[in-house]
Amino acid sequence: MTNKEFFDKIIISEEEKEKANFYLKYRGIYEHEHVREYLEGFKKDKVTYSEIATTFRYDKKIRRILFKYIGFVEEYIRAIICENFQDLETIKTNKLVFEKLKKYDDIYTALNEILFSELIEIMNKNIVNIKEHFKNHSKKNMKALCTLRNKVFHNVFILGYINYDECDVDGVKSSSFRDNVLNLRQLLPFDEMKNNFDAEIKEAKQPNENKYESQVEWRLLNEITLEI
């Protein structure tokens, strides 16, 4: 697909075409087309370029928030394991992860050298001893968090991604993006974190100043905003 062929599918001004050329090269025509098709499902009229560009910016805002709060969960898991298992020999895990842990002299260093999925493996195997710190823990919810983390960390267009894992939020099982975000929220260890998370997600809908000449007017569709 050429830039012109893509432009023919949307509403775009000549001024916007000049700005769009940069992002079509940077993000790729086919990712723009993917977002156009995603937005098309919420509109009767043609999608505008400014709606596509705004969706990219909003998606990045949400990813940055999720990145930060997934990091909080990861740090908390590591801290609780360190505090409850001073001796590596007392940790239950699979052979592969245990062999990796044994390479290090202390548990803190060891836990900083393993993958997030391996950290979750240790958590799941030892949850009996640390359950009080993780009220909404389940293997299903932790697996879903791992998948969400991977998509966020790999800069996937997360608003339109559809292959999230199923999680359980307040007794409701779902694999939707929104419920995976709510799963992250329920796994945050402190109410203050949850309140800040809610506020940042809400704030993400607000337009921010255009930092680059190639950015266009902020036009966010209400239908795609994340409400929690």
Image: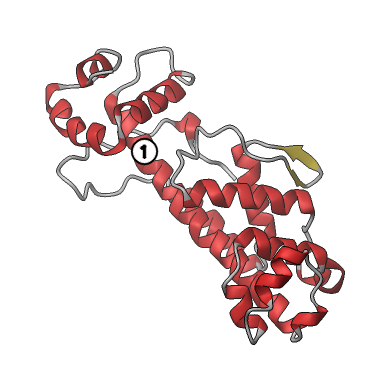
> As drawn, is 136 to the left or to the right of 128?
left
Number of marks present in the image shown = 1
> As drawn, is 61 to the left or to the right of 159?
left
Which quadrant of the rendered structure holds the N terminus? top left
Q: Where is residue 72? Give x, y as percent.
A: 57, 67
The image quadrant that residue 166 belongs to is top right
Q: Residues within 10 Å of mark 1 (few under 14, many from 20)?
A: some
Going 77% across and 58% down the picture, which residue do you hit? 136
| Residue closest to the eye, 221 or 121 | 121
The image quadrant that residue 216 belongs to is top left
Q: Where is residue 159? Give x, y as percent.
A: 50, 37
Residue type of the residue flagged with mark 1: Phe
Q: Where is residue 85? Give x, y as percent.
A: 76, 82
Going 18% across and 47% down the picture, which residue do you hit? 212
Q: Residue furthest right?
A: 128
Going 82% across and 69% down the picture, which residue do you hit? 126
> As drawn, is 16 to the left or to the right of 65?
left
Which quadrant of the rendered structure holds the C terminus? top right
Going 57% across and 74% down the picture, which residue do you hit? 112
Q: Where is residue 3? Give x, y as percent.
A: 22, 21
Identify the secondary structure beneath mark 1.
Answer: helix
Q: Is residue 2 above or below residue 220?
A: above
Q: Is residue 127 above or below residue 107?
A: above
Which colouring convention does the figure follow? secondary structure
| Residue closest to the eye, 47 or 117 | 117
Q: Is residue 92 above or below residue 25?
A: below
Mark 1, residue position: 56
